[in-house]
Image (cartoon, rainbow, N blue to C red):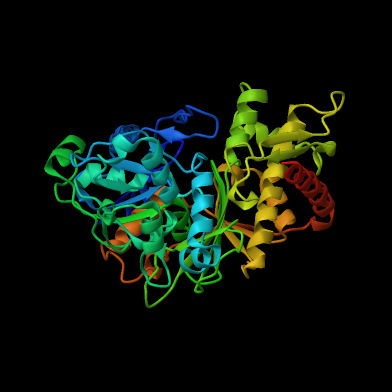
Amino acid sequence: MLLLGIDVGTSSIKVSVVDAQTQACVASAQYPDEESDIISPRPGWAEQSPEMWWEHAKAAIRKSQATDRYNPKDIGAIGIAYQMHGLVVVNEAQQALRNAIIWCDSRAVEIGNKAFKVIGEEKSLSRLLNSPGNFTASKLAWVKANEPELYYNIDKIMLPGDYVAMKLTGNITTSVSALSEGVFWDFQDDALSGDVLNHFRFDKSLIPGINPVFSEHGRVTSAVAEELGLRAGLPVTYKSGDQPNNALSLNVLKPGEVAATAGTSGVIYGVSDKLIYDPQSRVNTFAHVNYKEEEKRLGVLLCINGTGSINRWVKNTAGAGLSYADMNELAAGVGIGSNGLRVIPFGNGAERMLNNKIVGTHFHHIDLNQHGKAHMFRAVQEGIAFAFRYGLDIMRESGMNPSIIRAGKANLFLSHTFTEAFVNATHVPVELYQNDGSIGAALGAGIGAKAFSSEEEAFSNFKKLQVIEPKAIDRYEPVYQEWKALLDKQLNDE
């Protein structure tokens, strides 16, 4: 059986076709080649068109088929991964009523903060495992308050991957994992949160039917099958947010296992079997892909908005004509500490680990006679690594103490400079794998379609590429402490 995985990213849509028997990727494609735009009508706002995701998903599927490496009719199941925490609203005709408000949008921060206080901080944390913060529920409350006529035309709310699944199948579903990432789920009652619904006065009918992550979420319609050359009735058997899916793709399913990614955003994601939470909701706990009422599996998630975003910004600003590989090579030619240049890399909206403050990006100690673009490239990558260390220390307060972290050899982990800074700043070795979100989604589809006898069997051919050990902790630690002092000063000045 072949499995199709679709990864609905912020920058692009990637698809992969995987052979269930060997777990090998048969073909993959990405669309568009250039990064998709984020619409920002006002500072701190971030939107994308759901219809753009669908058109890009179809284009990526056609592009993968154009490789002629497989017969599309041999695909037996579809899995979807997607950017988390977004809000898509559709009417009864399944038409999107507005642009999606995506993960890095900051407009609903104060709405979530007020809900946190009214519901009660202890109740929110013990039941939701989070503050309502800037998550999907708060974004929906913003729409209700600011676009009331549109709000009353909403039939169903959903996350980005749910929209693509709806376009494929005409069916709308959600899961406990998805509802928890929107902060709609009460973990004490294992049910929709009455506190959240009552506080915001949301009608329960807005929530789609709840299915397990690994289950059938609908079947491809005849019209879509004909348009894309797929089999009519092909089931969608997996849907997950990108970070739980990234953990799945790295075989991070058991308590104590930890994954990391450094793409558009930066994430450390650890699995726990306890209902743990951060008292300040700086890191967040959601239901993992394999969460069951009788067997709790929670994902403890640290998210940094401005990782790949600032790396892209510095490339576009100071690296005209250079590839990311060129930038990495130049950065490697500069010594540890970037000759005193320090970068605070938070410039992509409110940062949850900084108590939802909008700190911005800051370059410190620029010496016009000494610092060039190579120093900027290294200082940015070091600053991102230090942001990971800062967040991991918060996770450690909640009992998450990884002895090793798994990551895909992609994005910033392609840079030796970043990876070296990451392991030495965090004091934790990294195992690198050839993983990919769309491949993870395909394997998830196989688990949901019962193509594997167990979750473990889906990774029976899983092999690590390399292990990077920290060997220069004593050289990075003083640089990190100086960086942290600059950040602390910035936070205190806010």
State the residue lying farthest toward the front: 118
> Where is residue 323, by image quadrant?
top right
Horizontal side of 70 relative to 457 (left or right) equals left
Q: Is residue 331 above or below residue 180?
A: above
- In x, y percent, where is residue 388? 66, 52
State the residue lying farthest toward the top: 321
Would you say residue 472 is visible in this rendering? yes
Q: Which residue is drawn at the image coordinates 52% and 57% (left, top)?
A: 116
Q: Nearer the viewer, residue 150 or 52?
A: 150
Q: Quadrant of the C terminus?
A: top right
How many dots with numbers?
0
Q: Which residue is drawn at the image coordinates 84% and 57% (left, top)?
A: 474
Horizontal side of 240 relative to 346 (left or right) equals left
> Where is residue 457, by image quadrant?
bottom left
Q: Which residue is drawn at the image coordinates 73% and 45% (left, top)?
A: 491
Horizontal side of 199 relative to 206 (left or right) equals right
State the residue lying farthest toward the left: 222
Would you say residue 84 is visible in this rendering? no
Q: Nearer the viewer, residue 482 or 382?
A: 482
Q: Quadrant of the N terminus?
A: bottom left
- In x, y percent, where is residue 140? 39, 45
- In x, y percent, where is residue 350? 58, 42
Q: Which residue is drawn at the image coordinates 37% and 70% (left, top)?
A: 190
